[in-house]
Amino acid sequence: MQQRKPKFCAAEGAAPEIPVSQGAMACDGWPEAEGARAERSPLPRKKSLALDRKRWNTVVNVVLVAFVMAVPPFVVVYGGGGVAPAVWIAAARARLRRDSGDGSFPYARSPPDKLLGGLLPDGLDERSCRSRYESSMYRRNPGRRPSPHLIAKLRKHEELQRRCGPNTNAYNLAIEQLRTGRSVGSPECKYVVSISYRGLGNRILAAASAFLYAALTDRVLLVDPSNEMDELFCEPFPGTTWLLPRDFPLASYTNFSIDTAESYGNMLRNKVLSADAPAAELPAFAYLHLDHDYGHEDKMFFCDDDQRLLSNVQWLVMRTDLYTVPGLFLLTAFQEELDALFPERDAVFHHLVRYLFHPTNHVWGLVTRYYRAYLARADLRLGIQVRNFDPRHAQSPHILQQITSCVWREKLLPELLATEEHAARAPGARSTAVLMTSLRSWYYERIKGMYWDRATATGEDVSVHQPSHEGQQQFGKRSHDGRAWAEMYLLSLCDVLVTSGWSTFGYVAQGLGGARPWVLHKQPENLTSAPDPPCFRDVSMEPCFHAPHVYDCKMKRGMDTGEVLPHVRHCQDVSWGLKLVDPKLYKA
């Protein structure tokens, strides 16, 4: 019979940053003061011994808490060789608060699950990519658990990547075949190359979409190393690389566009490809232009007959700045497998992004240092992501009002006193750390000033932080992208998120964190007042597919693809877009 393990607790409201068995105290509550022990105990021996232990624990706990209150927080080196925040000090303080009636925040009940329920493969070198196995120590939300079928599929795909990836005989043979310009009848290995371009959020969504397509079609995923992809993200697959070698023979692939003759749409339009063509007559590669400006023929990618034709082409090169996954769910050929992989349809990107994208050690240092300095000790962490698509809104009082109206109306932040009176801090009142991310500092400075100038109506303490303000988006600049990736990750560590509609930056953060955000309505160009209502609670943490196809492949006519399946519906922030939802939560 398996023994029941004792329960332990970390800090109330603190992230499970180290296994609680290494620093937290047992969850038996802070014992009340005991009277003097009688000379001769009337209790049975076992009960007397238990009482003695309880009294001894009381003395030890008093000494421990006195030490905790006197000594500033420090860090503990744990067995894995890394440095993690010392949450046991916060645990002791939280334990005192709990006996004062403060039960507003949960606290860790078990050690962090570094493999995310089997999503991640075990055995990779932790020192070369600390974020892969340390990230769970920084999250209060453990996230959704992957299905057994998804775990098995990932392990099988990892084996495919090792067998057919760069520096293997199979890869070298496929490269030689590509140079001939013709496809082969039954290639040993097939490939999809994801082009990395546009902003970091777009690149993450694009690579995640390409990976799911590769897994569904048994293709090796190779990611274009442009735009510092190798300096931002660790290798996700054990024993191989996902980076396309720089001597790839299609030297101009990064310049492929809607006008490229080898695009699937153009080859269909020009009758270069046909469904009855023998495999030997197919080209060695096809370019999939799935960008926001793609045309009708390009969108045939989302039709079953076209997928059967593409399955015979050994090399596919894909460009997209979109999250195309909802379109894959509409393909009949993939539906059964997708249903088994993702029984929770609103958690697809959540699993993909946690599996694929791990910050390199440099970026992880940016994340953890900022987290420990500004966020770790707060009872509540609120992330606010502000994205202004119109430069005229860079310093808009109306948008400032929209943000404050949202957080006050939804009770995400306490409102401020109208006068300079001081509100007494209520016993057990929580502290809140607000993490703001934006290209500019104007909104951060105003909100920080509000909570400095005025007391909160509840007596709660609110601190406001913004790691950087780059001014404008800078494509392909290493330092800019590194900070952007760190800030996406920091947002994902927050307990509650407020994001900007249409923003891929926000999509990545909510997917990593497994959170349904409150979303600020996108502002019209002629903004004259704050939007009312200012925000809405999103029905799903999934990103929105901004430019979906609207075509019935069987009937060969237009169709509202947001009305076909109960779990593929229209987005709330982009009304014509598509997103995956839990049908039980979706409201049209």
Image (cartoon, rainbow, N blue to C red):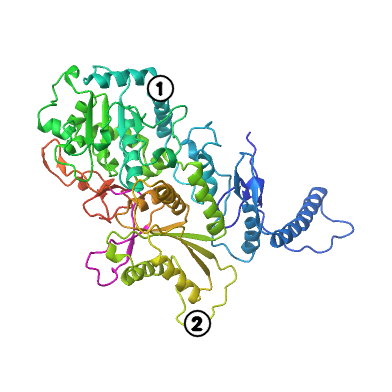
Q: Residue at x 28, y 45 (%)?
A: 567
Q: Residue at x 35, y 45 (%)?
A: 476
Q: Is residue 294 above or below residue 71?
A: above
Q: Secondary structure at mark 1?
A: loop
Q: Amino acid at mark 2?
A: Glu
* Mark before the other along the chain sequence, 2 or 1: 1
Q: Residue at x 47, y 36 (%)?
A: 120
**Looking at the picture, how far across and down is residue 97, in whole percent?**
62, 63
By secondary structure, the bulk of the magenta-drawn segment is best described as: loop
Spatial CA distance of label 2 from label 1 is: 68 Å
Classify 10 Å Cα crowding around label 2: few (below 14), some (14-19), many (20 and above).
Answer: few
**Looking at the picture, how far across and down is residue 378, in whole percent?**
54, 61
Q: Which mark is residue 167?
A: 1
Instruction: Describe residue 202's horizontal placement relative to residue 468 as left or right.
Output: left
**Looking at the picture, how far across and down is residue 584, in whole percent?**
33, 50
Q: Is residue 124 above or below residue 89?
A: above
**Looking at the picture, how far across and down is residue 533, in whole percent?**
30, 67
Labels 2 and 1 touching (C-beta < 8 A): no
Please tell me whether mark 2 or mark 1 is closer to you in this view. Answer: 1
**Range drawn in magenta:** 518-544
